[in-house]
Amino acid sequence: MAVLNSPGFQLQPSAEQVPLSTNYITNFDFLNQYLPDTYEKEFERYGNRTVASFLRMVGAEMPSNSDMIKWAEQGRLHTKYVNCDSSAAAAADSATITVSDANVTAIAIRAGQTVFISDNATGLSNKGIVTAVNTSADTFDVAYYEAGGQTFSGDAVLSVWIYGSEFKKGTVGMIGSLEAEDEFFDNSPIIIKDKYAVSGSDMAQIGWVEVTTENGATGYLWYLKSEHETRLRFEDYLETAMIEAVPAEAGSGVANAGLNPIYGNKGSEGIFYVVNNRGNVWGGGNPTTLSDFDSIISRLDKQGSIEENVIFLNRAFSFDIDDMLAAQNSYGSGGTSYGLFDNDEKMALNLGFTGFRRGYDFYKSDWKYLNDPTMRGGLPTGASATGTVTGLLVPAGSTTVYDQILGKNAKRPFLHVRYRASETEDRRYKTWITGSAGGAQTSDLDAMEVNFLSERCVCTLGANNFVLFRYGA
């Protein structure tokens, strides 16, 4: 039987921009001689309501004094072209190969090198030696080692990669050299703000409910609860903004300065955006079998091959992995295995797994952000859903990049936050009080205003090592 839709979880906001009628006693019926028996302390029915923790677990925070964060990531060591064609017909002893791969300015092939040439469709292949190169036309001449000549037809789409070189005795050295090619990426910090305001009169109001918040603040002053919750909400936004941020596209309403005079007009590259565009994406929802994970592992083999990885996932994905691993137990069909590690029928049975190893180490961790119904936990799932994220694979450890601010190579976590700071201004997490109430004496406003501000962006290094699990192609 399914969980009934009613009664369900409440999504009604608990925060309003006006004093709530539920804050104070409003029933003054003096004809009733009995006072209500009330619980003084507010009951925490939703437990810990914050969703931030992801970046604190996997990343770090570092200062920056620029509007733009730039870094370089290493390119491949070896060169392979996957969109080539041959000028010769099958059985020819030599041919001219044209390289048509995108973003190729000058082919990195030199005379004397030995190459492997393969038909992308059939797998038929030849090995040959390069006899001449025309870098301006992106072509090279090759002579085949095989006596039967070219094994594929002249209209085949080919892949070419270099595996060595061969020269005669007493000849000159290799003609030409190769320059290292880096890929450069950048991101721009965004300014995140919030504010809590309460009038001086409301600060003098006596409350009858003892309130508490996740950071341990307690008391009978309701405005303190609201201020603490504003702070907690802002701290959540510091993380979720780094996860969800997208750059403003040219021609969009955000980028239109006339329509958007004071609010942000550039955006930033959040984690989901970067992995969607430069990383690996599993578009089938949750991988539920070892063969599914084998295809993911095959992709990771073609990327950075990071040994340890953590999958941050929602509850359904976590259960799917548990079921997949439990199915590998030969005694699992028809009952649970006993005896292993001194288990017996009187022990509490652990039906979950913390991780597994298959080629690489994969650990899993529940991500509250993907489970919370007020965040991504309320999005649709299933074959008809598009774009709903169920998990994110994050490589553990750090990587070496060239930091243009430092002017040298530096080790950085794959995920880390850069915030604006200098010797006189630190914008990692600013908070200040204005007004004339609550100890503030900065203006004639009969209120206390607590302001929050941060300027930051997230740097996703080596996005090709990440995997985003979502629904939809």
Image (cartoon, rainbow, N blue to C red):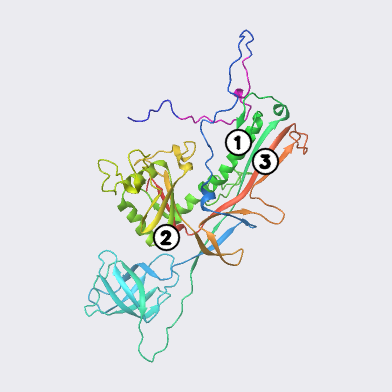
- State the image coordinates of residue 237 (x, y, percent, origin top left): 56, 43
Seen from the viewer's position, the closer of residues 351 and 130 is 351
- State the image coordinates of residue 88 (x, y, percent, origin top left): 27, 75
Disc number placed over residue 229 in the picture, else none: 1
Q: Earlier in the sequence, mark 1 or mark 3?
A: 1
User: SS for tag 2?
Assistant: loop
Q: Is residue 439 left or right of residue 325?
A: right
| Extent of the magenta region | 9-27
Seen from the viewer's position, the closer of residues 291 and 220 is 220
Q: Residue at x 42, y 76 (%)?
A: 135
Identify residue type, mark 2: Glu
Q: Earlier in the sequence, mark 3 or mark 2?
A: 2
- State the image coordinates of residue 468 (x, y, percent, origin top left): 42, 51
Identify residue type, mark 1: Glu
Which residue carries the number 3 mark? 451
Residue at far bottom of view: 170
Which residue carries the number 2 mark? 307
